[in-house]
Amino acid sequence: MKFEILNKEGFARAGFITTDRGLIHTPFFMPVGTNGTVKAMSPEEISDMGYEIILSNTYHLYLRPGHETIKKLGGLHKFINWQRPILTDSGGFQIHSLASLRKITSEGVEFRSHIDGSLHFLTPEKAIEIQIALGSDMIMVLDECVSYPMDKKYVEASVILTKQWAERCKDFFEKQKAKGALFGIIQGGIYPDLRHKALQDLIKIQFDGYALGGLSVGESKEEMYKIIREIAPLMPEDKPRYLMGVGDLIDVLYAVEHGIDMFDCVMPTRNARNGTLFTSQGRISIKRSEYKDDPNPLDPNCQCYTCKNYSRAYLRHLYMCREILSMRLNTIHNLHFYANFFKKMRKAILENNFQNFKKLWLPILEKNACSQD
């Protein structure tokens, strides 16, 4: 993997990552395909929208259908018919999201499957082994994503554990002579001093990319922004910087302003299924009665399939009837909106126009944001 910066405006930067499976322009957003599919979408549709990389989840694919099965079938790219790059999460987020089903030790994490209750033990080495079997282009180390709020003493011990796991991941990755890029994950909760320590620990180990993890897990916006502001500019300049699990476009603007290159989130797809749609005029909750007789397209400034062919009234009708097509059309629009937003943001950075782009979009993104989450 090679990373090149084409232009910077302040800390905001635009460039590209070169991989064996293609070029990825930065900053970029990764649609989430947890189980090897971006919900309601085909790989061809995702690619046609301009997405150059997707994310899949190690833990979920390990449980079902199993990484060995996927490997036998030619790897994840062939299995899901996606020929562009794939980033796989290590399973670290499930340490947070499935807290009631796991037990952490220095050796790894004992999980009880949320599917059938079976017991599994995920070590740092196992997490890398699974991702190598999947054929991931960007591999994440196993980390502990601590919950919020969390006592500082516990978070301090967690940072030490995550460092030890990162070292083991790196050793195993190198011994396997694996292809792809290995990312270290900076933890430390809401404590800046622990984040600084975690970053310095990972820089000493040396990774191909660096990620900020453990944010957007319940902390306030102010707490999250403080960590981004203090840590992102200090992440290695010549490596991609990844903010894990953050996809609110207001947060994206703030993070890009401070030097972040990579994002992922279920926000556009999950909101689509729940009837919340992002437009150039602010968020729309399509379930609202005001759209019952509305003949207009969802977004008059959008050229996606949904907006070119269907009215707000029809989209509301589909949603109220719980039709499968509702999920399809809404997801097409939201993902198209995100793809275009990032494309325009990259262009703005390249033209030294990012601050104007931010000023233009902030009031739009803030409109109806609180009432329609």
Image (cartoon, grey):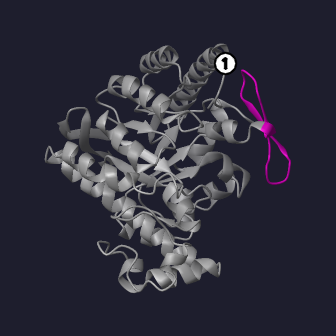
Does any portion of residue 372 appear in the rendered image? Answer: yes
User: Magenta residues, as a range?
Assistant: 100-120
Q: Is residue 307 left or right of residue 197?
A: left
Residue type indicated by callout 1: Asp
The residue depicted at 28 percent of the width and 57 percent of the height is 343
Residue 103 lies in the magenta stretch: yes
Q: Position of residue 161 (x, y in %)?
A: 63, 19
Label 1: few (<14), some (14–19) or many (≥20) C-alpha neighbours in 10 Å: few
In this rendering, is residue 148 above or below 60?
above
In the image, 165 versus 337, the foreground residue is 337
Residue of label 1: 151
**Residue, x 38% and y 66% (percent of image)?**
336
Q: Considering only vertical position in the picture, is 163 above or below 28?
A: above
Whether the magenta-drawn stretch holds residue 73 is answered as: no
Residue 146 higher or lower than 13, as above or below: above
Nearer to me, 62 or 324: 324
Nearer the observer, 95 or 105: 95
> For the N terminus, which image quadrant?
top left
Task: Locate residue 25, reporting x and y percent.
Answer: 29, 50
In the image, what residue occupies the spot 36% across and 50% down?
28
**Image location (x, y in percent) of residue 2:** 30, 40
User: Going by the image, does 38 lie left or right of 46?
Assistant: right
Q: Quadrant of residue 53?
A: bottom left
Q: What element carries label 1?
A: loop
In which quadrant is the C terminus drawn?
Answer: bottom right
- Let me know if residue 1 appears in the view: no
What is the x, y in percent for residue 107? Answer: 72, 24
Residue farthest along the left direction in this orientation: 351
Residue 360 is left or right of residue 149, and the answer is left
